Amino acid sequence: MACQRNAVTKNICDNVLFLIAGNDTSQLNKTSLPMILAHSPAGASSKQLTHHAQLIRRDRWFGQYDYGAAGNIKKYGSPNPPKYDLSKIKVPITLMYSADDWLSSHEDVQALAQDLPIIFEVVQVPVKPFNHLDFIWSVDAKVLVYDESLRILNYFNNNS
C-alpha cells in the first residue's frame, strides 16, 4: 500500500532501496516497484546478513561464519573461522560488478579476482548509475546483465 504508484509515501520506498544498494533512479523500474517490494526482502536469513557484516568488518578477509572463539573451536577446531580455500575452484569465473554498487565495491571485486585461480573476465556494467539491485530489477538488466551473461555462457558452450 505505502509503495503503490500513487501513494504519497512512494518516494520513501524508493529511498529505502537506495540506502541499501546504491543511489540510482535512472535504472529503477518504477512501475514494478510495488510488486518488487511486495516480495522483498526475501531469500536471506539473519545468519547470512550477519555473515555479510562480519566479512565487511574483517576487511578483505573471505572466510566462514564467525561463531565467536568458543563456537569456532567447537565448529572448526580453531578460535578463528577458516578462510575459504579459493584454490579449489577449478572452473573459470566471471565477476560482474557496477560502479554504484554499495554492497560490492570495485576494490572488493579486484581483491576477489586476485584470489581466484581462474578468472575468465571481470566485467563492469557500462552504466555509471547502476546499483546492486539493478542486476535484477533494472529497466536495462536484460541488455546490460542477462545478455552479457548469455554471451559468456555461449562462449563456453561453443568452445568446450
Image (tube, rainbow, N blue to C red):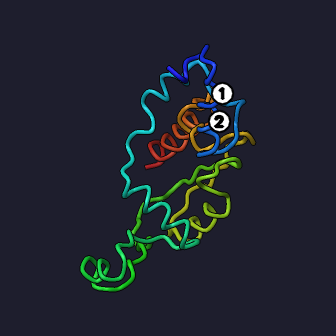
Q: Is residue 61 above or below residue 49?
A: below
Front residue of 12/79: it is: 12
- Residue 92: give x, y in percent of width and height: 48, 58
| Residue 46 % position (x, y) | 38, 53
Residue depicted at 51% across the width and 65% down the height: 118
**In the rendering, at what x and y percent does residue 148 appear?**
58, 39
Report helix, strand or loop for mark 1: helix
Number of callouts = 2
Residue shown at 43% from the left, 71% from the top: 63
- Residue 58 is left or right of residue 86, and the answer is right
Q: Residue 140 falls in which quadrant of the image?
A: top right
Which quarter of the picture shows residue 58?
bottom right
* Residue nearest the observer in this picture, 152 or 107: 107
Q: Is residue 138 above or below residue 121?
A: above
| Residue closest to the eye, 41 or 77 | 41
Furthest residue toward left: 74
Looking at the rendered structure, the secondary structure element under dot 2 is helix
Image height of 48 relative to 150, above or below: below
Q: Residue at x 75, y 42 (%)?
A: 128
Residue at position x 63%, y 19% from top?
Answer: 8
Give me the C-alpha separation between circle 1 and circle 2. 6 Å
Q: Mark 2 — residue?
A: 15
Q: Residue furthest right?
A: 128
Amino acid type shown at disc 2: Asn
Task: Find residue 33 and report its horizontal and vertical position in percent.
Answer: 55, 24
Q: Which residue is mark 1?
A: 11
Look at label 1 and name its amino acid. Answer: Asn
Quick check: marks 1 and 2 in contact, CB under 8 Å? yes
